[in-house]
Image: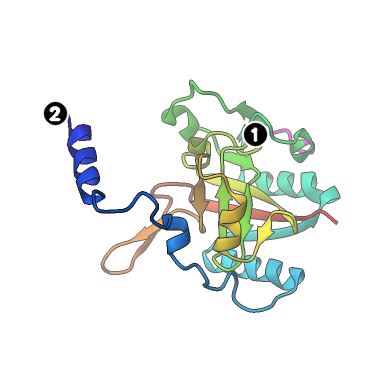
Amino acid sequence: MSSRDLILGRVRRALADVPRNDTPYEQAVQREYRREHGDRSTARTVGLLAENLADYRALVHRCAAGDLARTVAGLLDAHGSASVVVPAGLDGTWLAETEVTRVPDRAEDTPAALDRVDSVVTGCALAIAETGTLVLDGGPDQGRRRITLVPDHHICVVRVPGQVVASVPQALERLDPARPLTWISGPSATSDIELDRVEGVHGPRTLEVVLVSEE
């Protein structure tokens, strides 16, 4: 008997006395908790997102859609980047004003190869204001998960207000659980028992978020 058969057998025995017409789990569990805290306008929700992102030590920038290429170019230049990973579906206009070498997101790239790239620019699936969290789901403008974990500098573009939600429950309603979801709250960091903070342990050392107005 395999481990799989053993585990499934235990599950069947545990469920042996449950009627077939029993109330489904998703209906049996009450989910009447608040979907968001407070009554905020769209502008205040976006402001809360920016505040919480900054609290996690992400660097937050705001710009109009027409200034996005200039903003991204400035951030790459300020970081001293000579190369940037580009997801296959990234809008080409985002990098229209930079001469930085573009490295395509390829399946054959190794972690060592990605570690030699200075930066990565991606979009996101959405951003959560109450937790200051960016969620990536491997969409065309985000690429494979590893390109946002290996390079030391990540620039993430969030379209405002279309990609901003107030709370985690609202985010879950819009996300596909079958996709590879990456939840990012600030740059990668950890600390030891003395609370000495070290950044860049299991992801980028520097996270820059560009809130670009769609209006």
Residue 125 lies in the magenta-colored region: no
Instruction: Check disc 2 and report the residue beneath it.
Output: 1
Q: Position of residue 206 (x, y in %)?
A: 53, 52
Instruction: Check disc 1 and report the residue beneath it.
Output: 140
**Mark 2, residues whose alpha carbon is within 10 Å: few (<14), some, or many (≥20)?**
few
| In this picture, residue 79 sits left or right of residue 67 | left
157 or 73: nearer the eye?
157
Q: Position of residue 57 (x, y in %)?
A: 53, 63
Residue 42 in sight from this viewpoint: yes
Residue 78 in sight from this viewpoint: no
Badge 1 marks a residue whose secondary structure is loop
**Which image quarter is the N terminus in?**
top left
Q: Position of residue 6 (x, y in %)?
A: 17, 37
| In this picture, residue 70 sits left or right of residue 187 | right
* Mark 2 residue type: Met
Q: For the magenta stretch, what is the residue range?
A: 96-100
Q: Quadrant of residue 120?
A: top right
Instruction: Identify the residue shown where x is 58% and y is 34%.
Output: 143
Q: How is the image coloured?
A: rainbow
**Mark 1, residues whose alpha carbon is within 10 Å: few (<14), some, or many (≥20)?**
some
- The mark lying in front, picked from 1 and 2, is 2
* Mark 1 residue type: Pro
Residue 97 lies in the magenta-colored region: yes
The answer to whether 85 is drawn above or below residue 47 in the figure is: above
Magenta stretch, main secondary structure, is: loop
